Each structure stands twice: as structure tokens, then as C-alpha cells.
Image (tube, helix red, strand yellow):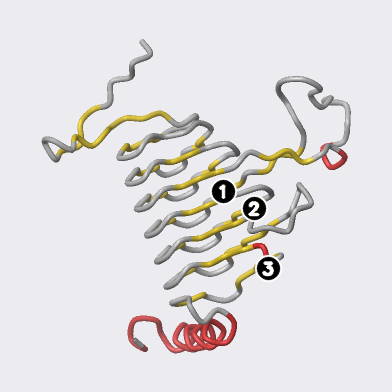
Amino acid sequence: MLKRYGFFGFIRLIVSLLYTKLFFRNARLIRVPFDIRNRKLIKIGREFTSGFNCRLEAHPVDGINSLKLIIGEQVEMNDYVHIAAGELVQLGNNVLIASRVFITDLNHGNYGGENPDSPFSKPNDRKLSTSPVIIGDNVWIGENVCILPGVNIGAGSVIGASSVVNKSIPENCIAVGNPVRIVKKYNTDLLIWEKYISDNK
């Protein structure tokens, strides 16, 4: 292990292990620094692993002190992952998240429907709006992905690097791009990934 991480890396690992066992006993390894805000509104499942400089935060926009961020079992996230929850962000089991991923159910203001916010108001003065984000089991989220409010990602799906996920993705799909689009779907009969053909032509 010393050979793999080097001396200072090994020391950091030991510090992270001590931090994990002291404050998050069910977790596998939380690398410090680790920023968690409103911990009582956040549930972290067994065998959780984080990279360096991850930030988990919960803001009870509705004023209800219920769980806002729920992380399933054996979830792994790499460095600089930021998750912000105001109503509900839920990650299933065995979700794998690469570095520099942002996931949120929050938005500064309302920009659709009735009574939208004015572009002439200060963004910080606009009331926070929310729409839940649900991520299923066995989802793999690539580097630099941004997952926006109101999105559901079905179990077994893969989100390609640098995608902006502004719409829901069904289960067992590969989706990429900005804005995101589905490019492949797993055929459970043939056991292969096939090119996705949209019904909307």
C-alpha cells in the first residue's frame, strides 16, 4: 500500500480511515477533506466510499426536516463530487460516480409556468425551487456530468463524461451529450447493447 500511494499519500489514507471510523462507521472510506452540511438530513448507506473534496449538502427548502439526500449501499464517488438537495436526491445501491460531478434538485428561481422569476431580480433574492432527482441501482456516472432537477435515471444506465442531464433516462441505457441523449439500450433478450432508435422522429 505504501508503494501504491507513496509516503504522504499513505498518511492521508490513514487519516481518512480514522475519520471514517470515528464519524461514519458504516462507510468503507471517506477521504478527507470531506464537507457535509446538515448531516441530520442526509442518510449514507453501508460501504460508502468517497474521493477527496466531496461536498454533500441538504437545505430543507420546504421547511420539513426529513431526509433530503439518501445514498444507497456500496455507493462510490471520486474526487470533487458535489450533491445539493432541497426536496429529495436519492441514489440507489452500487452507484458509481466519477470526479467533478454535480447533482442537484435545486434551482435559484422559477423559470417556467406561472409567476416566473424576472431576469431583472438578483438571483440570490429568488426563491429556491425544487424537483426530486432519483438515480437507480447500478448506475455509472462519468466525469464532469451535471444532473439537473427533476431527473430520473433508471437502473443500470450509464451517463457519459461531460453530459448535462436535463431529462429522465430509462433503465439500461447509455446516454451522452449536452443536452443528454440516449445512444444505446441494452437488449435483455440478445444480451447486447444496441443502437437506440427514438420513437420521436
Nearer the observer, disc 2 or disc 3?
3
Of residues 170 and 122, the one drawn nearer to the viewer in this rendering: 170
The numbered mark, 2 or 3, whose residue comes first in the sequence reads 3
Where is residue 192? Give x, y as percent. 15, 38
Circle 1 Cα neighbour tier, 10 Å, few/some/many (<14 / 14–19 / ≥20): many
Q: Determine the secondary structure under disc 3.
A: helix
Q: Amino acid at mark 1?
A: Ile
Residue that carries the numbered disc 1 in the rendered image: 103
- Identify which amino acid the numbered label 3 is placed on: Lys
- Inter-mark Cα distance, 1 to 3: 19 Å
Which image quarter: residue 169? Answer: top left
Question: How much space separates mark 1 and mark 2, taking CA atoms?
Answer: 6 Å
Query: Which residue occupies 84% across, 37% down?
Result: 126
User: What residue would you read off at disc 3?
Assistant: 40
- Image mark for residue 84: 2
Residue 66 in the image: state x and y as whole percent: 68, 58
Residue 3 position, x and y percent, is 33, 86
Q: Are dots 2 and 3 in contact, CB under 8 Å?
A: no
User: What amino acid is found at the position of numbered circle 2 in the picture?
Assistant: Ala
* Element on which disc 2 rests: strand
Left or right, 66 with respect to 102, comes to right
Circle on res. 68? none
Q: Residue at x 50, y 36 (%)?
A: 165
Task: Quarter of the image for the C terminus: give it.
Answer: top left
Name which of mark 1 and mark 2 comes first in the sequence: 2
Residue 183 vs residue 95, the one in the foreground: 95
Q: Name the residue: 42% across, 65% down.
A: 73
